[in-house]
Amino acid sequence: MSLENRVLIITGANAIAAAAARMAAEAGARLLVAAGDGGASPWALAHETGAECWTGDLTLAGSADSVLSQCLAKFGRVDGLFQAAGLSGRRFGDGPVDECTDEGWETTIAHNLRVVFQLCRAVAGRMMQQARREDGLRGAIVNLGSVLAEWPEPRHFAMHAYAAAKGGVTALSRAMASYYAPEGIRVNVVAPGLARTPASEAADADSVLAAFLQKKQPLAGGMIQAQEVARTALFLLSDEARPITGQVVAVDGGWSVTGV
């Protein structure tokens, strides 16, 4: 994929985000990694990939502008944004809507939808100010969705705040794609099934869930690898995806079509 000298912002430092940062660096991109201090160290990932590093709470007002400002101070422009940061709200009270707590709803929406909106606003606004490149484009945005937004699963994944947040990501991204296409800005969504991330580690020890995933995601033989999701996101940011916008690409190992 062609990312040589493209300036990318990647949010998150775990699993999918980390895989994307490594692949993008190998493809010649210039990177800024933006993540919180919890979990895998964004500083370690930045050191490994030669990226700039921003750390802080992405949900706070002003964080998106701070991320963009650091990117512009270092590189002078932004060509792409991959929003991979997010969280499962189960431990905060996400669940079926009649059981979902206020904290579960608000925390899940904040980390999975508000952050996406705030960074889209900052980055799209900057791209609108940039001159078109030689290919006529100004930039590309890829947001991380989920198969749960369109293909819910009630037995094991009744997380209604999470599904609502990811549904919002899809709706926002499609609306943006329509509005910004004439301005040379592309916006797409990658919607993974259950991928191997720190948040999904507990599934490895659950034999019932493991058997379910074998049937639900047969092409993956269980969980999807983070690298597979990251590779798709970077393709959508690359020059090879120039005609593609407003799409939701399910990287789900068959989740959306198995009917299990």
Image (tube, rainbow, N blue to C red):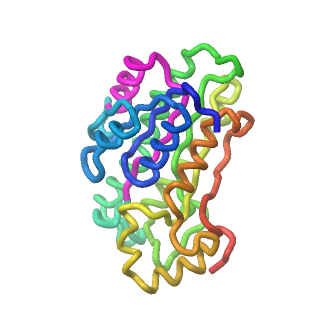
State the quadrant of the N terminus. Answer: top right
Highlighted magenta segment, given as a residue range:
63-87
- Say whether residue 239 is left or right of residue 162: right
Relative vertical location of residue 230 with respect to residue 161 in this rendering, above or below? above
Q: Residue at x 60, y 49 (%)?
A: 232
Q: Residue at x 40, y 32 (%)?
A: 32
What x and y, as percent, mark residue 123? Answer: 48, 28
Relative vertical location of residue 193 with respect to residue 154 in this rendering, above or below? above
Relative vertical location of residue 145 with respect to residue 204 in this rendering, above or below? above
Q: How many marks?
A: 0
State the quadrant of the C terminus. Answer: bottom right
Q: Is any atom of residue 167 visible in this view?
A: no
Q: Residue at x 33, y 26 (%)?
A: 66
What x and y, as percent, mark residue 245? Answer: 68, 39
Q: Residue at x 51, y 69 (%)?
A: 223
What x and y, as percent, mark residue 7? Answer: 50, 27
Q: Is any atom of residue 159 visible in this view?
A: yes
Relative vertical location of residue 5 with respect to residue 187 in this rendering, above or below? above
Quarter of image, res 221: bottom right
- Say whether residue 253 is left or right of residue 226: right
Quarter of image, res 214: bottom right
Question: 142 or 168, which is in the foreground?
Answer: 142
- Say whether residue 98 is left or right of residue 55: right
Q: Is residue 69 magenta?
A: yes
What x and y, as percent, mark residue 138? Answer: 61, 23
Q: Is residue 184 magenta?
A: no
